[in-house]
Image: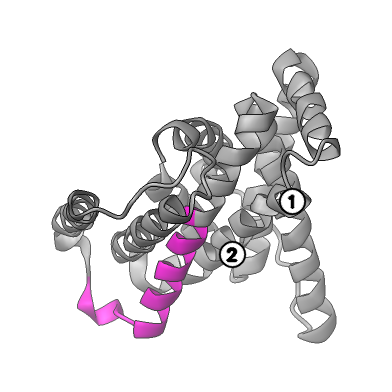
Amino acid sequence: MIALQSRANGELSHLLGNSTEAALVSFGSGLIVISLIAPFNKSIKVGIKNLRAAVAAKEIPRWRLFAGVLGGSFVALQTQVVPLIGVALYSVASIAGQTAMSLVVDRIGLTGGGKKLISKRRVTAALITVFAVIVSALDRISLASFSVVAVALATLAGALVGVQRALNGQINEHSKASFTTSLLNFFMGTSVLTIMLFALLIFKGVEIAPLPSGPWWIYTGGTIGVIYIAFTSTIVQHLG
């Protein structure tokens, strides 16, 4: 799903010529989708109440509710990097970052499912995962577009996702509603991206580009993100 989102957001960024605007459009569309679902979904309303109660009872620190900021930062990096190095190389680097960070957050128990030792078996499994992604994407990786900085940013983006998923696991543990977790994430992410775009407008003189008329799939990044966060927030709290 991340690869599909990367393709959509990367193309949107290319057409707009403004990666931050593309990230905001992607995240904003996701917020619209989940906001349209919310009034008709009782579990989302119950989840919000559960989360408020958990915060009031200090069962979950307030700062962990800002997981969506990491998601917004991830998409901002994604829309910046994919047009430079392509989806294949971006996927390899970001998954490497996710995998490495996932081992760390599991070790410190940030997922909410308890601490998990970084065993040789888990490290081996992580390396096999990254190797499998490299093999599957090898024929689509172009050395001509290779950039150390861009690859490093892609790896950082993946690491942010690793932390975000862990925090979402904790949020989901208290909300008991995965789409509530998605709603909170997209609200936070859209907010931080809006601030970032306004900062660029004020201090850098960046102009907002008109939205392209198509192709239609460039606007699917937000919807993919809603589904991805809903599923991973549930899975992570159980599996790590």
Decide which of tag 2 and tag 1 comes sooner along the chain: 2
Task: Write down the residue under mark 2.
Answer: 76
Task: In the rendered view, tell whether residue 36 sits above or below residue 218.
Answer: above
Mark 2–mark 1 distance (CA, rounded to whole Å): 14 Å
The verdict on residue 145 being magenta is: yes
Tell me how many marks there are. Answer: 2
Q: Give the label on residue 198, or none.
A: none
Q: Which element carries disc 2, helix, strand or loop?
A: helix
Which scheme is used to colour this image of the protein? Answer: one colour
**Looking at the picture, does residue 208 appear above or below residue 24?**
below
Residue 59: quadrant of the picture: top right
Asked which secondary structure carries label 1, the reply is helix
| Residue at image coords 42%, 68% | 154
Q: In the image, which disc is placed on residue 188? A: 1
| Residue at 83% in and 33% down | 52
Amino acid carrying mark 2 in the image: Ala
Residue 112: where, in percent of width, then height?
54, 41
Q: Quadrant of the N terminus?
A: top left
Identify which amino acid the numbered label 1 is placed on. Met
From the viewer's perspective, is the residue at label 2 or at label 1 nearer?
1
> Magenta-highlighted stretch: main secondary structure?
helix
Residue 140 in sight from this viewpoint: yes
Residue range corresponding to the magenta coloring:
142-162
In this view, 2 is above or below 35: below
Tell me, yes or no, whether the highlighted magenta stretch contains residue 143.
Answer: yes
Closest to the observer, 209 or 33: 33
Q: Position of residue 236 (x, y in %)?
A: 46, 38
Q: Residue at x 73, y 37 (%)?
A: 32
Name the side, left or right, on which 69 lies relative to 55.
left
Callout 2: few (<14), some (14-19), or many (20+) C-alpha neighbours within 10 Å?
A: many
- The quarter of the picture where the C terminus appears is top left
Image coordinates of residue 19 in percent, x first then y, are 59, 68
